[in-house]
Protein backbone atom coordinates (compact mmCIF):
# COMPACT_ATOMS: atom_id res chain seq x y z
CA UNK A 1 0.00 0.00 0.00
CA UNK A 2 1.28 3.52 -0.76
CA UNK A 3 0.64 6.99 0.65
CA UNK A 4 -2.06 7.80 -1.89
CA UNK A 5 -4.06 4.71 -0.91
CA UNK A 6 -4.31 5.77 2.74
CA UNK A 7 -4.87 9.42 1.88
CA UNK A 8 -7.83 8.42 -0.28
CA UNK A 9 -9.19 6.61 2.75
CA UNK A 10 -8.72 9.78 4.81
CA UNK A 11 -10.60 11.78 2.16
CA UNK A 12 -13.51 9.31 2.17
CA UNK A 13 -13.73 9.64 5.94
CA UNK A 14 -13.53 13.45 5.78
CA UNK A 15 -16.56 13.66 3.48
CA UNK A 16 -18.73 12.11 6.18
CA UNK A 17 -18.58 15.40 8.04
CA UNK A 18 -19.76 17.50 5.10
CA UNK A 19 -23.16 18.49 6.43
CA UNK A 20 -22.03 19.02 10.01
CA UNK A 21 -18.63 20.72 10.43
CA UNK A 22 -18.90 24.08 8.64
CA UNK A 23 -17.47 26.68 8.98
CA UNK A 24 -14.63 24.33 9.94
CA UNK A 25 -13.03 22.21 7.19
CA UNK A 26 -13.72 18.53 6.55
CA UNK A 27 -10.77 16.43 7.70
CA UNK A 28 -10.07 12.69 7.81
CA UNK A 29 -7.22 10.80 9.50
CA UNK A 30 -5.91 7.22 9.21
CA UNK A 31 -3.25 5.65 11.45
CA UNK A 32 -1.18 2.87 9.88
CA UNK A 33 1.30 0.63 11.70
CA UNK A 34 3.25 -2.19 10.09
CA UNK A 35 0.89 -2.16 7.12
CA UNK A 36 -2.28 -2.31 9.25
CA UNK A 37 -4.86 0.39 9.89
CA UNK A 38 -5.00 0.63 13.68
CA UNK A 39 -7.17 3.73 13.97
CA UNK A 40 -9.11 6.23 11.92
CA UNK A 41 -11.46 9.15 12.41
CA UNK A 42 -12.89 12.32 10.95
CA UNK A 43 -14.12 15.71 12.13
CA UNK A 44 -17.72 14.84 12.88
CA UNK A 45 -19.29 18.01 14.24
CA UNK A 46 -18.43 21.70 14.53
CA UNK A 47 -16.96 22.20 18.00
CA UNK A 48 -16.19 18.49 18.41
CA UNK A 49 -12.90 16.61 18.32
CA UNK A 50 -10.78 17.01 15.21
CA UNK A 51 -10.05 14.05 12.95
CA UNK A 52 -6.62 13.29 14.45
CA UNK A 53 -8.00 13.09 17.98
CA UNK A 54 -10.85 10.81 16.93
CA UNK A 55 -8.36 8.55 15.15
CA UNK A 56 -6.07 8.43 18.22
CA UNK A 57 -9.00 7.73 20.55
CA UNK A 58 -10.17 4.75 18.51
CA UNK A 59 -6.70 3.29 17.85
CA UNK A 60 -6.45 -0.40 18.75
CA UNK A 61 -2.86 -0.04 19.99
CA UNK A 62 -0.15 2.55 20.60
CA UNK A 63 0.63 4.69 17.56
CA UNK A 64 4.27 5.03 18.58
CA UNK A 65 6.30 4.44 15.43
CA UNK A 66 3.19 4.51 13.21
CA UNK A 67 2.29 6.74 10.27
CA UNK A 68 -0.75 8.99 10.45
CA UNK A 69 -2.36 10.28 7.25
CA UNK A 70 -4.27 13.56 7.61
CA UNK A 71 -6.05 15.32 4.74
CA UNK A 72 -5.35 18.81 6.17
CA UNK A 73 -2.43 20.18 8.19
CA UNK A 74 -2.92 19.58 11.95
CA UNK A 75 -3.85 22.68 13.93
CA UNK A 76 -1.49 24.43 16.34
CA UNK A 77 -3.80 26.82 18.19
CA UNK A 78 -6.39 26.62 20.93
CA UNK A 79 -9.91 27.07 19.59
CA UNK A 80 -12.93 25.01 20.59
CA UNK A 81 -10.47 22.10 21.07
CA UNK A 82 -6.77 21.85 22.04
CA UNK A 83 -4.07 21.87 19.31
CA UNK A 84 -3.86 18.59 17.40
CA UNK A 85 -0.10 18.97 16.93
CA UNK A 86 0.49 18.71 20.68
CA UNK A 87 -1.56 15.51 20.86
CA UNK A 88 0.28 14.00 17.90
CA UNK A 89 3.72 14.79 19.32
CA UNK A 90 2.76 13.14 22.61
CA UNK A 91 1.82 9.94 20.74
CA UNK A 92 5.29 9.74 19.08
CA UNK A 93 4.38 8.69 15.52
CA UNK A 94 7.31 8.03 13.21
CA UNK A 95 5.72 9.93 10.33
CA UNK A 96 2.89 12.33 9.52
CA UNK A 97 1.58 12.52 5.94
CA UNK A 98 -0.46 15.65 5.15
CA UNK A 99 -2.67 16.21 2.11
CA UNK A 100 -2.40 19.99 2.02
CA UNK A 101 -1.37 22.89 4.21
CA UNK A 102 -4.10 24.82 6.05
CA UNK A 103 -4.61 28.35 4.63
CA UNK A 104 -5.74 29.64 8.04
CA UNK A 105 -3.05 32.13 9.17
CA UNK A 106 -3.30 30.66 12.68
CA UNK A 107 -2.10 27.33 11.31
CA UNK A 108 -0.56 27.69 7.85
CA UNK A 109 2.83 26.01 7.86
CA UNK A 110 3.12 26.18 11.65
CA UNK A 111 1.83 22.65 12.20
CA UNK A 112 4.26 21.23 9.66
CA UNK A 113 7.14 23.17 11.22
CA UNK A 114 6.34 22.05 14.79
CA UNK A 115 6.12 18.39 13.80
CA UNK A 116 9.45 18.56 11.96
CA UNK A 117 11.16 20.35 14.86
CA UNK A 118 10.12 17.48 17.12
CA UNK A 119 11.87 15.01 14.86
CA UNK A 120 8.75 13.62 13.20
CA UNK A 121 9.18 12.88 9.50
CA UNK A 122 6.57 14.98 7.70
CA UNK A 123 5.42 14.58 4.10
CA UNK A 124 3.16 17.27 2.60
CA UNK A 125 1.19 17.34 -0.66
CA UNK A 126 -0.08 13.79 -1.10
CA UNK A 127 -3.24 14.09 -3.25
CA UNK A 128 -2.98 17.84 -2.73
CA UNK A 129 -5.45 18.74 -5.49
CA UNK A 130 -8.13 16.39 -4.17
CA UNK A 131 -7.58 17.54 -0.58
CA UNK A 132 -7.83 21.19 -1.60
CA UNK A 133 -10.98 20.64 -3.68
CA UNK A 134 -12.63 18.84 -0.77
CA UNK A 135 -12.43 22.04 1.26
CA UNK A 136 -12.75 24.61 -1.53
CA UNK A 137 -15.49 26.41 0.40
CA UNK A 138 -13.34 26.70 3.53
CA UNK A 139 -10.24 27.71 1.54
CA UNK A 140 -12.00 30.61 -0.23
CA UNK A 141 -13.68 31.86 2.92
CA UNK A 142 -10.59 31.74 5.12
CA UNK A 143 -8.53 33.59 2.49
CA UNK A 144 -11.07 36.28 1.51
CA UNK A 145 -13.77 36.48 4.18
CA UNK A 146 -16.30 36.10 1.33
CA UNK A 147 -18.50 32.98 1.26
CA UNK A 148 -18.04 30.34 -1.42
CA UNK A 149 -20.99 30.72 -3.81
CA UNK A 150 -22.73 27.80 -5.54
CA UNK A 151 -25.36 28.68 -8.15
CA UNK A 152 -27.82 25.83 -8.71
CA UNK A 153 -30.84 25.67 -10.98
CA UNK A 154 -32.94 23.14 -12.88
CA UNK A 155 -33.97 23.77 -16.46
CA UNK A 156 -35.54 22.06 -19.42
CA UNK A 157 -33.33 21.02 -22.28
CA UNK A 158 -34.34 24.22 -24.08
CA UNK A 159 -33.22 26.42 -21.18
CA UNK A 160 -36.49 27.19 -19.39
CA UNK A 161 -36.89 27.20 -15.59
CA UNK A 162 -40.67 27.66 -15.67
CA UNK A 163 -43.61 27.83 -18.00
CA UNK A 164 -44.84 31.23 -19.21
CA UNK A 165 -47.45 31.04 -16.42
CA UNK A 166 -44.66 30.76 -13.85
CA UNK A 167 -45.42 27.11 -13.06
CA UNK A 168 -42.19 25.21 -12.35
CA UNK A 169 -42.99 22.20 -10.13
CA UNK A 170 -41.29 20.00 -10.91
CA UNK A 171 -38.95 20.42 -13.88
CA UNK A 172 -36.41 17.94 -12.50
CA UNK A 173 -36.96 14.44 -11.13
CA UNK A 174 -37.37 13.26 -7.53
CA UNK A 175 -33.79 12.00 -7.61
CA UNK A 176 -32.51 15.44 -8.57
CA UNK A 177 -34.65 17.01 -5.84
CA UNK A 178 -32.80 14.85 -3.33
CA UNK A 179 -29.53 16.19 -4.75
CA UNK A 180 -30.82 19.73 -4.15
CA UNK A 181 -31.47 18.92 -0.50
CA UNK A 182 -27.98 17.42 -0.18
CA UNK A 183 -26.54 20.66 -1.56
CA UNK A 184 -28.56 22.65 0.98
CA UNK A 185 -27.24 20.52 3.83
CA UNK A 186 -23.63 21.12 2.75
CA UNK A 187 -23.92 24.93 2.63
CA UNK A 188 -24.26 27.37 5.51
CA UNK A 189 -27.01 29.35 3.81
CA UNK A 190 -29.50 29.01 0.96
CA UNK A 191 -30.61 32.14 -0.91
CA UNK A 192 -33.52 32.92 -3.22
CA UNK A 193 -35.08 36.09 -4.61
CA UNK A 194 -38.50 37.42 -3.66
CA UNK A 195 -40.03 36.52 -7.05
CA UNK A 196 -39.19 32.85 -6.54
CA UNK A 197 -40.58 32.98 -3.01
CA UNK A 198 -43.87 34.53 -4.12
CA UNK A 199 -44.22 32.07 -7.00
CA UNK A 200 -43.21 28.84 -5.21
CA UNK A 201 -43.48 29.57 -1.47
CA UNK A 202 -40.71 27.06 -0.63
CA UNK A 203 -39.61 25.94 2.85
CA UNK A 204 -35.88 25.86 1.91
CA UNK A 205 -35.15 23.20 4.54
CA UNK A 206 -33.40 19.83 4.38
CA UNK A 207 -36.01 17.08 4.43
CA UNK A 208 -34.90 14.39 1.98
CA UNK A 209 -31.40 13.76 3.40
CA UNK A 210 -29.72 13.86 6.80
CA UNK A 211 -28.06 17.18 7.60
CA UNK A 212 -28.43 20.62 9.09
CA UNK A 213 -30.92 23.16 7.80
CA UNK A 214 -29.08 26.13 6.28
CA UNK A 215 -29.75 29.74 7.13
CA UNK A 216 -32.49 30.95 4.77
CA UNK A 217 -31.73 34.25 3.06
CA UNK A 218 -34.40 36.06 1.05
CA UNK A 219 -33.37 38.92 -1.24
CA UNK A 220 -36.33 41.31 -1.13
CA UNK A 221 -35.38 44.89 -2.05
CA UNK A 222 -38.85 46.37 -1.38
CA UNK A 223 -39.90 43.97 1.41
CA UNK A 224 -42.79 42.39 -0.47
CA UNK A 225 -42.62 39.08 1.42
CA UNK A 226 -46.04 37.77 2.53
CA UNK A 227 -46.28 37.33 6.30
CA UNK A 228 -47.72 33.83 5.76
CA UNK A 229 -44.68 32.66 3.72
CA UNK A 230 -43.31 29.22 4.63
CA UNK A 231 -39.79 30.58 5.28
CA UNK A 232 -41.13 32.75 8.11
CA UNK A 233 -42.30 29.68 10.02
CA UNK A 234 -40.30 27.28 12.22
CA UNK A 235 -37.49 29.70 13.07
CA UNK A 236 -36.27 27.29 15.76
CA UNK A 237 -35.55 24.71 13.06
CA UNK A 238 -34.23 27.05 10.36
CA UNK A 239 -33.53 30.74 10.80
CA UNK A 240 -34.49 33.27 8.11
CA UNK A 241 -32.88 36.62 7.27
CA UNK A 242 -34.41 39.04 4.76
CA UNK A 243 -31.93 41.20 2.83
CA UNK A 244 -33.58 44.45 1.85
CA UNK A 245 -32.78 48.12 1.18
CA UNK A 246 -33.59 51.49 2.76
CA UNK A 247 -36.77 51.46 0.64
CA UNK A 248 -38.29 48.83 2.95
CA UNK A 249 -41.47 49.85 4.77
CA UNK A 250 -40.53 50.49 8.46
CA UNK A 251 -43.90 49.15 9.62
CA UNK A 252 -43.25 45.87 7.76
CA UNK A 253 -39.75 45.70 9.28
CA UNK A 254 -41.25 46.11 12.76
CA UNK A 255 -43.91 43.49 12.09
CA UNK A 256 -41.31 40.98 10.92
CA UNK A 257 -39.18 41.71 13.99
CA UNK A 258 -42.15 40.91 16.23
CA UNK A 259 -42.31 37.39 14.77
CA UNK A 260 -38.55 36.88 15.12
CA UNK A 261 -37.37 37.71 11.60
CA UNK A 262 -34.26 39.83 11.10
CA UNK A 263 -34.16 42.27 8.20
CA UNK A 264 -30.71 43.19 6.97
CA UNK A 265 -30.53 46.56 5.21
CA UNK A 266 -27.96 46.38 2.41
CA UNK A 267 -26.94 49.14 0.02
CA UNK A 268 -28.59 49.24 -3.41
CA UNK A 269 -26.96 48.59 -6.73
CA UNK A 270 -27.54 50.86 -9.75
CA UNK A 271 -31.01 49.36 -10.25
CA UNK A 272 -32.00 49.98 -6.61
CA UNK A 273 -31.86 46.27 -5.84
CA UNK A 274 -29.93 44.65 -2.99
CA UNK A 275 -26.23 44.81 -3.84
CA UNK A 276 -25.28 41.13 -3.82
CA UNK A 277 -21.56 41.75 -3.31
CA UNK A 278 -22.28 43.79 -0.19
CA UNK A 279 -24.72 41.14 1.01
CA UNK A 280 -22.16 38.35 0.65
CA UNK A 281 -19.53 40.42 2.48
CA UNK A 282 -21.97 41.02 5.35
CA UNK A 283 -22.87 37.33 5.57
CA UNK A 284 -19.16 36.50 5.61
CA UNK A 285 -18.78 38.69 8.70
CA UNK A 286 -21.37 36.41 10.31
CA UNK A 287 -19.21 33.32 9.64
CA UNK A 288 -21.39 32.17 6.73
CA UNK A 289 -18.69 30.42 4.70
CA UNK A 290 -20.82 29.05 1.85
CA UNK A 291 -24.09 30.01 0.15
CA UNK A 292 -26.28 28.00 -2.21
CA UNK A 293 -28.20 30.21 -4.67
CA UNK A 294 -31.43 28.61 -5.89
CA UNK A 295 -32.68 30.81 -8.75
CA UNK A 296 -34.96 32.25 -10.15
CA UNK A 297 -34.13 33.99 -13.37
CA UNK A 298 -33.51 37.48 -11.91
CA UNK A 299 -31.06 36.22 -9.28
CA UNK A 300 -29.36 33.83 -11.72
CA UNK A 301 -28.88 36.64 -14.22
CA UNK A 302 -27.62 39.11 -11.60
CA UNK A 303 -25.16 36.56 -10.25
CA UNK A 304 -23.76 35.78 -13.69
CA UNK A 305 -23.75 39.45 -14.75
CA UNK A 306 -21.41 40.22 -11.86
CA UNK A 307 -19.46 36.96 -12.21
CA UNK A 308 -20.16 36.08 -8.58
CA UNK A 309 -20.60 32.28 -8.55
CA UNK A 310 -17.63 30.05 -7.82
CA UNK A 311 -19.46 26.85 -8.72
CA UNK A 312 -22.48 26.08 -10.88
CA UNK A 313 -24.71 23.02 -10.65
CA UNK A 314 -27.17 22.83 -13.53
CA UNK A 315 -29.83 20.13 -13.62
CA UNK A 316 -31.04 19.53 -17.19
CA UNK A 317 -34.34 17.67 -17.50
CA UNK A 318 -35.14 15.86 -20.78
CA UNK A 319 -38.15 18.10 -21.41
CA UNK A 320 -38.92 20.75 -24.01
CA UNK A 321 -41.14 23.60 -22.88
CA UNK A 322 -40.97 26.09 -25.73
CA UNK A 323 -42.18 29.49 -24.61
CA UNK A 324 -41.43 30.04 -20.94
CA UNK A 325 -39.19 31.77 -18.43
CA UNK A 326 -35.56 31.51 -19.46
CA UNK A 327 -32.97 30.46 -16.89
CA UNK A 328 -30.56 33.26 -17.80
CA UNK A 329 -31.62 36.69 -18.99
CA UNK A 330 -29.63 39.38 -20.79
CA UNK A 331 -25.95 39.43 -19.80
CA UNK A 332 -25.01 42.19 -22.23
CA UNK A 333 -22.93 39.76 -24.28
CA UNK A 334 -22.69 40.46 -27.99
CA UNK A 335 -20.09 37.98 -29.24
CA UNK A 336 -19.18 34.37 -28.57
CA UNK A 337 -15.76 35.52 -27.38
CA UNK A 338 -17.40 37.36 -24.47
CA UNK A 339 -19.30 34.34 -23.13
CA UNK A 340 -18.84 33.14 -19.58
CA UNK A 341 -16.89 29.89 -19.54
CA UNK A 342 -17.59 26.93 -17.27
CA UNK A 343 -14.94 24.33 -16.55
CA UNK A 344 -16.93 21.20 -15.85
CA UNK A 345 -15.66 18.88 -13.15
CA UNK A 346 -18.46 16.33 -13.25
CA UNK A 347 -21.17 15.35 -15.66
CA UNK A 348 -23.48 12.68 -14.28
CA UNK A 349 -26.95 11.30 -14.59
CA UNK A 350 -29.55 11.34 -11.79
CA UNK A 351 -32.61 9.41 -12.89
CA UNK A 352 -33.63 10.95 -16.24
CA UNK A 353 -31.74 14.20 -15.60
CA UNK A 354 -28.21 15.26 -16.51
CA UNK A 355 -26.23 17.12 -13.83
CA UNK A 356 -23.51 19.52 -14.94
CA UNK A 357 -21.18 20.50 -12.09
CA UNK A 358 -18.42 22.98 -12.82
CA UNK A 359 -16.43 26.04 -11.84
CA UNK A 360 -16.90 29.50 -13.30
CA UNK A 361 -13.68 30.63 -14.95
CA UNK A 362 -12.78 34.10 -13.69
Image (cartoon, rainbow, N blue to C red):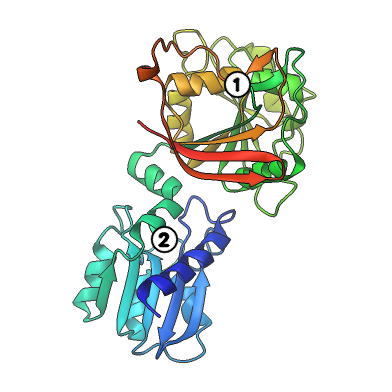
Q: Is residue 155 left or right of residue 164?
A: left
Numbered mark located on residue 349 in the image? none
Residue shown at the point (53%, 37%) measured from the top left: 291
Question: Circle 1: is it few (<14), some (14-19), or many (20+) Cα within 10 Å?
Answer: many
Res 114 seen here: yes
> 300 or 277, which is in the foreground?
300
Q: Is residue 33 left or right of residue 312?
A: left
Res 148 seen here: no
Q: Quadrant of residue 327?
A: top right
Question: Circle 2: is it few (<14), some (14-19), or many (20+) Cα within 10 Å?
Answer: few
Q: In the structure shown, which secondary structural element does the residue marked by tag 1 occupy?
A: loop
Q: In the structure shown, which secondary structural element does the residue marked by tag 2 occupy?
A: loop
Residue with the mark numbered 2: 79
> 112 or 10, which is in the foreground?
10
Residue with the mark numbered 1: 327
Q: Position of residue 123 (x, y in %)?
A: 27, 71
Q: Is residue 139 left or right of residue 218?
A: left
Q: Position of residue 331 (x, y in %)?
A: 46, 14
Q: Is residue 163 left or right of residue 4?
A: right
Q: Quadrant of the N terminus?
A: bottom left
Q: Please, which residue is most extreme toward the left here? A: 117
> 350 or 210, which is in the foreground?
350
Q: Is residue 246 above or below residue 75?
A: above
Q: Earlier in the sequence, mark 2 or mark 1?
A: 2
Amino acid sequence: MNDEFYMRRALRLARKGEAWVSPNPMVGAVIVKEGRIIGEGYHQMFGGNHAEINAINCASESMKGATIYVSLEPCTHYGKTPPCCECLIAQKPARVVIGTADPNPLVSGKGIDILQRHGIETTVGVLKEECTQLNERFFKFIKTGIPFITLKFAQTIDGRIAAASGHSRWISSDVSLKLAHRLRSSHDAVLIGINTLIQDNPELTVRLVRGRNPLRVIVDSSLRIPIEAQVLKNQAGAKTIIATTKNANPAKVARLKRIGIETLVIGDDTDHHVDLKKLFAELGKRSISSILIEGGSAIITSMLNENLPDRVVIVIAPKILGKGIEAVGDLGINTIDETLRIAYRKVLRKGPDIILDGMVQK
